[in-house]
Image (spheres, rainbow, N blue to C red):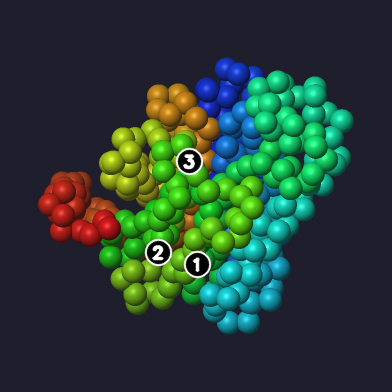
Amino acid sequence: MRYSMFAASVHGRKYQERGLPCQDNSSAMEFSGVQAIAIADGHGGKDYFRSDTGSKLAVKTAFNQIKIFCRELTDQFSDNGIRNFEFSIWDEWLKAVKGDWRERSTEIFNEPRWQNVSDKYKARFTSGYEIYIPVAYGTTLICAVSIGSQVLIVQIGDGTCVILQRNGEFKVPVPPDNETFANITTSLCDADAYKKFRHVVLDCDENSPLAPVAIFLSTDGLDDCYPIYENEKHLYKLYDEVILDSVISNGFARTRDELRNELLPYLTARGSNDDISLAYFVTRDLNLLKRILGKEIDDTEKYLQARKEILKRRAEGKYNHD
């Protein structure tokens, strides 16, 4: 399936007011029949004082490895190949952050965030031992790769992937991370980060009711705009009734502009105050999307009735959101 792609990051007030750069990064890429999106969320805590650079390097290295991985892919994704891919992302990211550290080592004491680094990590960062350097760049990462009849989603750390299936159901497909809770998250800077990636392969066969027609990736800045125990419900509603409705009514270009310039800045200002990244794949087949969302009927009254019925069935639990 070919998708329309989007990726954007917006600067949250809690970093703007401290004079700090956006900690998030995101991008989309397409080449030789491959489409990819990625988002990364630099931790922003006092000891992660170069996490804005860490998130940029995470997206960059993910895309570099996607190019290599897909070029060498002979058939479908294999579990062993995916594990090697995840290790390669982590390994290249480590090399990139250590290279950045060596290039900018003289800037350390002049950086605004250095003064807030804990004494423990000031001692570690100036010890000369490179083992501690990745902490300064700590970040999460989620990426999705579409090639042939499959989509691979790879994640380390918090944030959420949501998909819309052909049967009209929304779902969170990536296995949960038992080490991520509240403000604690796994990270690319962890010493054994390559073991902490989670992934899922989605079958895009057009005859399968579980095939994804839309895939959304969000950092916790978007997730935290909503109550923690109702997070998925609100994300489903945002993607369904706001973003996909806009795609159908206004087209892809206008929806992308409104997301980047209006909706995402509004959500961070009125919600989490955190940086927000959102990326998506959405099918280019708008007729298919209309059928799935119950918007294929031209008559306004019949359309509204169909939408009410869908929302009613979801409220009654007749659509599985697990």
Give amino acid for label 3: Ile
Give amino acid for label 1: Val
Residue 207 sits in quarter: bottom left
Residue 184 is marked as 3
The residue nearer to you, when weighing 131 against 235, is 131
Residue found 31% across the figure and 56% down from its top: 170
Rendered location of residue 210, percent (x, y) = 34, 69
The residue nearer to you, when weighing 26 against 86, is 86
291 left or right, relative to 151: left
Upstream in sequence: badge 3 or badge 1: 1
Give amino acid for label 2: Pro
Residue 148 sits in quarter: bottom right
Q: Is the residue under label 2 in contact with that under label 1 (CB below 8 Å)?
A: yes
User: In this picture, is 45 found above or below 282?
Assistant: above
Residue designated by label 1: 151
Residue designated by label 2: 212
Rendered location of residue 126, percent (x, y) = 80, 34
Residue found 44% across the figure and 69% down from its top: 202
Upstream in sequence: badge 3 or badge 2: 3
Separation of disc 3 and disc 2 at Cα? 30 Å
Residue found 60% across the figure and 60% down from its top: 194
Residue 161 appears in the figure? no
Rendered location of residue 269, percent (x, y) = 45, 24
Residue 221 appears in the figure? yes
User: Considering the numbered disc 3 on the image, is that residue within a helix, a strand or a loop?
Assistant: loop
Separation of disc 3 and disc 1 at Cα? 28 Å
The residue nearer to you, when weighing 273 against 44, is 44
Rendered location of residue 203, percent (x, y) = 43, 73
Upstream in sequence: badge 1 or badge 2: 1
138 left or right, relative to 149: right
